[in-house]
Image (tube, rainbow, N blue to C red):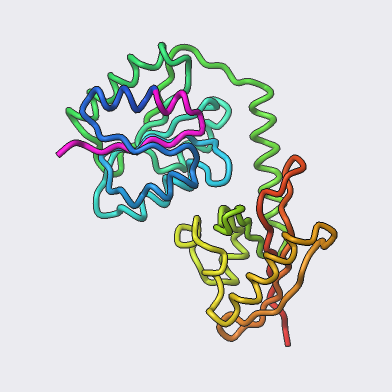
Amino acid sequence: MAKKALVVDNDFFFVEFLAQLLEERGYQVIKALDGKEGLAKFKHGPFDILFTDLIMPKIDGAQLIKIARQRFSGSHFSIIAISGAIIERQEDLFSIDADYCLAKAPLEKMEDDLNALLDRLEQHGVSPGEDLRIIEPGSLYPRQATTELIENLNFQKAVTESIGLGVVVVDRDVKIISATSRALEITKKSLDKILNKPVTSLLPKGGRPPLVHALKTVARDPELDRISLMVTLGVKRVRLVVSLLRFMGDVAGWIVAMEEVDE
């Protein structure tokens, strides 16, 4: 049986380049062009190897790796994180449960490093608990613009986590792409269990129709900023505030904010 690889990256040309390299080595390659699609491709697992970019829209590579380790905990397979910001993210890399982290470079410069890495993995494999190894093709230097972008993203994440409300980000297909720790507390869910699942799955069946109605209503009425509704989660009463998520002038999905209410 052919070895199976999953390649996840929002760079189409890199996905095709890596897929061809793996196919030439006898792998059956599953492709995904972002983290959300990559998560959906887990249904084809388990895999022998997973390559994933770290910086992707909606669901990033760190989340994808964490869920992969949980979903396929019975088999330790090789995970290679890929990033164009290795130096800038040096401090974060060791919290990511990957076996290798590979710096992006021009494709012709990466081919030899990738083949050498695959030779090593196929001959010796990876033992659980080994330290992350970073592969840098050539000399890399921090880029000020990239460093500032990552710092800004981390700051925005810290702001969202500090609001005190639960915040769930919902894609246009009504599936969850992000949730704060407070939202997970309120719903008593874990992030790996809700990502890429319908937002209605957060609620018991009785609370789902009002949420669906709220999602539809704010989507159909451009003058309506938000809709507030009350739902019951276990023994708690929770206020939900549903609003549209707009990005660069387009509707990108919904934001569902939640807060426990004392009654």
Residue 191's x, y, as percent?
50, 59
Identity of the residue drawn at 51% across and 33% down:
10
Q: Is residue 83 above or below residue 243?
A: above
Q: Is residue 243 above or below residue 130?
A: below
Residue 162's x, y, as percent?
70, 57
Q: Is residue 150 above or below residue 21?
A: below
Left or right of 249? Residue 40 is: left
Residue 130's x, y, as percent?
30, 38
Question: Tag count in the figure?
Answer: 0
Whether 144 is among the magenta residues is no
Q: Which quadrant would the C terminus be assigned to in this image?
A: bottom right
Q: Which quadrant would the N terminus be assigned to in this image?
A: top left
Residue sitting farthest toward the right: 223
Q: Give 234 or 138, whichever is nearer the viewer.
A: 234
- What are the residue bounds of the magenta stretch? 1-16
Whether 7 is among the magenta residues is yes
Residue 147's x, y, as percent?
65, 28
Left or right of 158? Residue 97 is: left
Left or right of 95? Residue 167 is: right
Q: Which quarter of the figure has residue 199? A: bottom right
Q: Give 216 or 14, whichever is nearer the viewer.
A: 216
Identity of the residue drawn at 57% across and 46% down:
58
Q: Give 83 or 171, whichever is nearer the viewer.
A: 171
Left or right of 174? Residue 2 is: left
Residue sitting farthest toward the left: 1
